[in-house]
């Protein structure tokens, strides 16, 4: 499951850098949870061809992450926003707590 989540996050960060065909195959496999045969049949690709494309594209995504680190930074920012929101719950000033929660939610949306 962790590997699947990792590639969903990498697709979210770097999907626009892939070809349309690569992105479609990866989304069908990782997001729609289709089998290799279910992906290949409508595209006219063998199961082995689909698997090879997925493996090549996984390597591309991992290379982007190694060089750019955007997915790791995004995950870190999400964690920071979560901690800020949790810490804000102990603030007695209701208006200040509302403002902090509102701003952390805006920050999450920007990610």
Image (cartoon, helix red, strand yellow):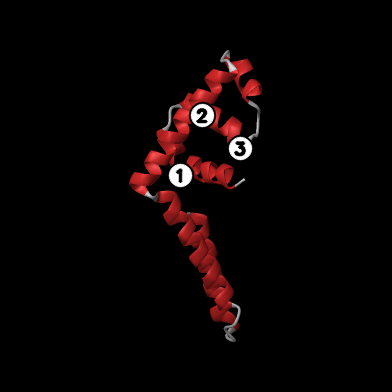
Give x and y (percent) for residue 67. 33, 45
Question: Which residue occupies the foreground of this view, 5 or 31?
Answer: 5
Q: Secondary structure at mark 1?
A: helix
Q: Secondary structure at mark 3?
A: helix
Q: Which residue is mark 2?
A: 54
Task: Give the CA distance from mark 1 to mark 2.
Answer: 17 Å
Which of the image's four quarters has the N terminus?
A: top right
* On screen, residue 20 above or below 7: above
Disc sitting over residue 13 in the figure: 1
Image quadrant where residue 44 sits: top right
Q: Secondary structure at mark 2?
A: helix
Of callouts 1 and 3, which one flags the residue occurring earlier in the amino acid sequence? 1
Q: Decide: marks 1, 3 in contact (CB < 8 A)?
A: no
Q: Which residue is mark 3?
A: 31
Task: Give the CA distance from mark 3 to mark 2.
Answer: 13 Å
Give x and y (percent) for residue 69. 38, 50
Q: Image point 54% across, 42% down: which residue?
A: 8
Q: Image point 56% across, 77% down: which residue?
A: 88
Give x and y (percent) for residue 11. 49, 40
């Amino acid at each position: 499951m962790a590997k699947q989540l990792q590639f969903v996050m990498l697709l979210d960060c770097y999907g626009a850098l892939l070809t349309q065909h690569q992105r479609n195959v990866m989304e069908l496999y990782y997001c729609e949870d289709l089998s290799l045969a279910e992906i290949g049949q409508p595209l006219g690709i063998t199961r082995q061809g689909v698997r090879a494309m997925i493996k090549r594209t996984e390597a591309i995504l991992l290379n982007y992450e190694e060089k750019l680190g955007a997915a790791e930074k995004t995950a870190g920012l999400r964690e920071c926003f979560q901690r800020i929101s949790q810490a804000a719950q102990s603030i007695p000033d209701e208006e200040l707590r509302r403002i902090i929660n509102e701003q952390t939610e805006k920050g999450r949306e920007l990610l």
